[in-house]
Amino acid sequence: MSAVPTASSPAALPADPQAILQQVFGYAAFRSQQQDIVAHVTAGGDALVLMPTGGGKSLCYQVPAIARHRGGHGVALVVSPLIALMHDQVGALEEAGVHAAFLNSSLTSEDAQRIEREMMSGRLVMLYAAPERIATPRFLGQLDSLYERGLLSLFAIDEAHCVSQWGHDFREDYLSLNVLHERYPHVPRIALTATADDLTRADMIERLQLDEARVFISSFDRPNIRYSIVEKDNARAQLLRFIGDEHEGDAGIVYCQSRKKVDETAAWLVGEGLNALPYHAGLDAAVRKQNQDRFLREDGIVMVATVAFGMGIDKPDVRFVAHLDLPKNIEGYYQETGRAGRDGAPADAWMAYGLADVVNQRRMIDESPAGEEFKRGQRGKLDALLALAEAHGCRRVRLLDYFGESSQPCGNCDNCLNPPATWDATEAARKALSCIYRFHQNGGQRFGAGHLIDVLRGKVTDKVTQYRHETLSTFGIGADIAETQWRAVLRQLIALGHVRSEGEYNTLELTGSAREVLRGEVQLLLRRPSEVQRRGKSGRGSGAGGGRERPPPIALDDAALGRFTALKAWRAEVAREHNLPAYVVFHDATLAEMARELPGTLDALGEISGVGAKKLDAYGRDILRVLGG
């Protein structure tokens, strides 16, 4: 086995962006808008880049950083909010022969000082650091010195939506990053994010002082992701069925709203035979790191997490992202679901959604200490997400429309694959509102959804008789409508703002707009509740043993499949030796292409997509030996 590769000297790196792409990263051509972005930033221009997860954002600053370093401009500073992302990106760059480093709290003081010396010498091509470190007087003093000597090549601000109060991951430390433009006006800046609506975009431009920057917006479409949203009906059982039927043995992420629910769901999945781990901010830092490392390095792990997990996770083979609770807005939903299928292979975004989700999200906004303008903005964002969840038509069309992108029905979401039946719920909505009004008339009491549905369906309970609600004119007027349908009606009435939920017991109260519904001026067309559609076999994930072997990303015959399996075993050994995730060594797609093409020489191996010059030198002979059997 080859020794651990060390970074090439800066002089060994090419200066032309196209040559960098081919020789360093092993790719023949740029994708989408990458080439225009790279050319603009390399020439010294500022840029704001909106590109979906898996679209290749990192190359948009890594290639210019290398090119400008070769041009004598020194080090590029990459602002990143996550230690795990820094570790993986620096590991991947060093594997490719690019001298990169990070400064964060995981380093000893001796290691940090060594890296600072490398930075100040101009030998370092890229340095990753968190925003809170960049704003310190000591670090700014070091940047001042580099700037005076002409050795600051580029500022790359990753996850730039964190600067916006309207964004879904607002981080106060990002607000200090305007100092980069004010203090170092001649250093080009590139700000990147996977998602931002118009409001967030404008906020990013203002707060980062990117008024003169060129804006690049790529398509937000991720055609390999299948979007599915189901009505909650025993969400745990629905999740288990989804994983067992379609993703047995696959890596996936399950998002929950609370830390308690994360812990309980992870423990329950383990009890059901899946290899599941929890992740949230309440866990000990060492446990969080251990669980994240296992997720990145092992196959078939299901990570159950709050939204504290995921930003910057580069694992390419996450086959599903599931939500057991409604996110706050479409940006959060899009960012989280985008962590599936980064390798371009088929993946699923699955969510279970119910009345309680709507109630909880509305209440969190209403009870927030934020100003009314901010609350209005958050309500608008929630309304857009609720409209996506309740949609009868193509999910992808509605999702892309939110980001200002027009599209045609995709044929790869639940509504396209199994068009839902709909029903006119206008009259049912009027009955529900009338019943809430009768409650108020009958002693000024307010009640929750469960009791309201019991009265509408004519169900005699202790609570019904206690308040003599069997005597109301609305008692039993909805007996012909199933409980699940009534919940859908109430969910939509709350989502549209005709009813609000109040207090600890989520009691229901009419709003001013309810009059329009009661007068028959508003039509409600709802999707009819249905059984979860199953595709594939039923059963449980076998989890603990790693599950089934995942097929390669391209079709291979039996002989090539054997070579692919051998290459994966070799890669696993290299990854363990270098303490890196396997995909940092080579992606599955690169190994599959090697197995199919069966290159017999180093030159032929160098033609495989994803094999750069440094990796060819470090691993080429080993790979040819594995391929030769």
Image (tube, helix red, strand yellow):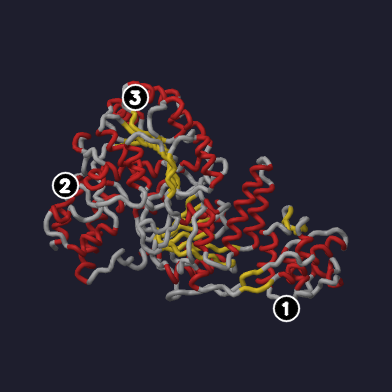
Q: Which amino acid does label 3 sit on?
A: Leu
- Please name whichever residue, 232 or 125, is drawn nearer the observer in this view of the structure: 125
N-term mark: 1 or 2 = 1
Looking at the rendering, in which quadrant would you find the C terminus? Answer: bottom left
Rendered residue at 67%/41% (across/down): 369
Q: Is residue 36 positioned above or below 9 on the image? A: below
Q: Where is residue 320 in the image (x, y as percent from the top left)?
A: 44, 61
Determine which residue is flagged by label 2: 617
Decide which of tag 1 and tag 3 comes sooner along the chain: 3
Question: Is residue 316 toward the left or the right of residue 416 in the image?
Answer: left
Considering depth in this image, is 342 or 71 the residue closer to the camera? 71
**Front label number (1 vs 3):** 3
Q: What element carries label 3?
A: helix
Residue 418 coordinates in the image, percent (x, y):
51, 74
Res. 5 image quadrant: top left
Residue at x-position 68% and y-position 51%: 363
Measured in 3D between alpha carbons, the distance from the residue under mark 2 to the one under mark 3, in whole angstroms, is: 33 Å
Q: Label 1 belongs to which residue? A: 480
Up the image or down, 349 lies above or below 2; here it is below
Q: Which of marks 2 and 3 is nearer the N terminus?
A: 3
Name the residue type under label 1.
Asp
**Which residue does the image show at 53% across and 48% down from the upper left?**
197
Residue density around tag 1, few if under 14, some if 14–19, many if 20 or more, within 10 Å: few
**Residue found at the far bottom of this picture:** 480
What residue is shown with label 3? 146
Q: Which amino acid does label 2 sit on?
A: Asp
Element under label 1? loop
Residue 598 screen position, x and y as percent? 16, 62
